[in-house]
Structure formats: C-alpha cells, structure tokens
Image (cartoon, rainbow, N blue to C red):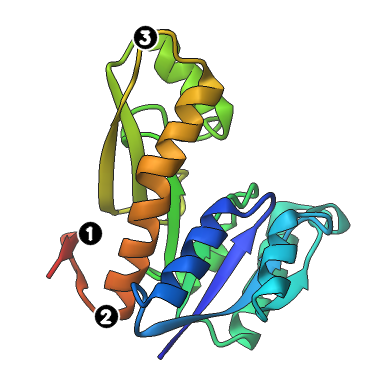
Amino acid sequence: MKNIIVLVSGGGTNLQALIDAQKSGIIKNGRITCVISSKPDAYALTRAEQNGIKTRVMPRKEYGDSKSYSLAILDALNEEKADLVVLAGFMTILDEAVTKAYPYKIMNVHPALIPSFCGEGFYGLKVHEAALNYGVKVSGATVHFVNEKADAGAIIMQKSVEVKNGDTPEMLQKRIMEQAEWKILPEAVSLFCDDRIKIVNEKAEVI
C-alpha cells in the first residue's frame, strides 16, 4: 500500500476527487496518509480532517525563499514516507531539491492540454482566459509528472473538453474540472499505485 501525500493551497476539489476515488475503490493500492497545505485557511484542510486524514500546515510566507521552503517540504515528505506526491491546487513551484529527490513520484494536474497554455504564469483562471482569447475549440486537463520546469514533466493522461460559444473563464474552468480533472487525476494516481506507469525515454507509458 503506497503512501500518497497531497499538497494543497485552496479549496481542495481535486483532493476531494481523490478521497472519493479512494472510498469507491478506484484507488486500491494507495492511501492518502497526509495533506500538507501552504495556507492555514485552505478549505482542503477541512476536507482532509472530515475524512480522518492527517494534516500539516506549512505557510509559504514563513520561509524566506523558494529554496528554504522547498527543503522544508522535502523534510516533511521524507517524514511522511511519501511514495507518491500529488499537487492538487498547490500554488508554489517547488525547487529542484524536491523534484530530484522524488523523480517520477510527483504528480500534478494542469487545466489545459499541455503543451498549450502552460508553464510559468499559467495557473487558475489565467489558463482559461488564454484559451478563450486564442479561440480554441477544445481544451481539457493534463496529469503529468513534475520536474524542474513548470508543466514540463512526462505526460501521464489527458482528457479533452469542448469549449462552447459564450464560455467565460469561470464556466470553462468548472466544465474542465468536472469532466476532466476530477476523472483523470484519480485514474493516474490509481495507475501509479498499481505500478502501471513506466518511463521510457523520459516519457510515461501506461502498461
């Protein structure tokens, strides 16, 4: 049984999708053993507590720079014996000290079809604003491993979602969460816990 550590900063809707998947048996060979938040008032902490999951609060503002914060997160991951780390709305980019310590063991969900609308500065509603400004007809979500560059790690799963006439960034965000993010993130976590993801030439293959 693999230990899944989830890093959060906000409402925790993706965390809830993982909790629901664990309860329903979609995730069989892993358990969310700890939720770590960069903000003390994140509602994700309440979701974790309501489901009997251990929580830790590590406010980003209490650390001088990204390096010191990342090292503190790394210590926490080691203490929690993390087998898989999931970034679920975690709004801090981690230093390479963390990504190099956990290669192909840190997963993130991005609300677009990478390589479109991704990288530094593309987060939250900004992703959907960019997609709508460009006039794309489909967008979606991508689950990928995390490496030293923002949104540049090996892609595990993707799911497309229709962009509709008259969409606002908020409408598109909601549709992508409901139709893509909340589905493929638990599926990707399940694949990892079942040892069904292998890395070939720095690309992720599902077996």
Q: Nearer the viewer, residue 112 or 155?
A: 112
Q: Residue at x 46, y 17 (%)?
A: 130
- CA separation in Å, label 1 and label 2: 20 Å
Q: Which mark is residue 202?
A: 1
List the residue tagged with mark 3: 165
Q: Position of residue 143 (x, y in %)?
A: 36, 52
In the rendered view, tell whether residue 121 sits above or below residue 93.
above
Q: Residues within 10 Å of mark 1 (few under 14, many from 20)?
A: few
For the residue marked with disc 3, what is the amino acid? Answer: Asn
Residue found at x 65% / y 87%: 79
Question: What residue did someone put label 2 on?
Answer: 194
* Helix, strand or loop status at disc 1: loop
| Residue count near mark 2 (Cα–Cα under 10 Å), binned few <14, some 14–19, many ≥20 | some
Give the CA distance from mark 3 to mark 1: 38 Å
Quarter of the image that includes the N terminus: bottom left
Q: Residues within 10 Å of mark 3 (few under 14, many from 20)?
A: few
Q: Which of the two marks, 3 or 1, is nearer to us in this view?
A: 3
Q: Earlier in the sequence, mark 1 or mark 2?
A: 2
Q: Residue furthest toward the right?
A: 62
Q: Amino acid at mark 2?
A: Asp
Q: Secondary structure at mark 2?
A: loop
Q: Nearer the viewer, mark 3 or mark 2?
A: 3
**Viewer-closest of 38 and 16:** 16
Residue at 40% x, 27% y is: 117
Q: Is residue 172 left or right of residue 62?
A: left
In the rendered image, which quarter contains the C terminus? bottom left
Calculate the distance from the C-alpha at mark 3 to the C-alpha at mark 2: 40 Å
Q: Position of residue 17 (x, y in %)?
A: 48, 59
Let me know if residue 99 appears in the view.
no
Comes first in the chain, label 3 or label 2: 3
The amino acid type of the residue labelled 1 equals Glu
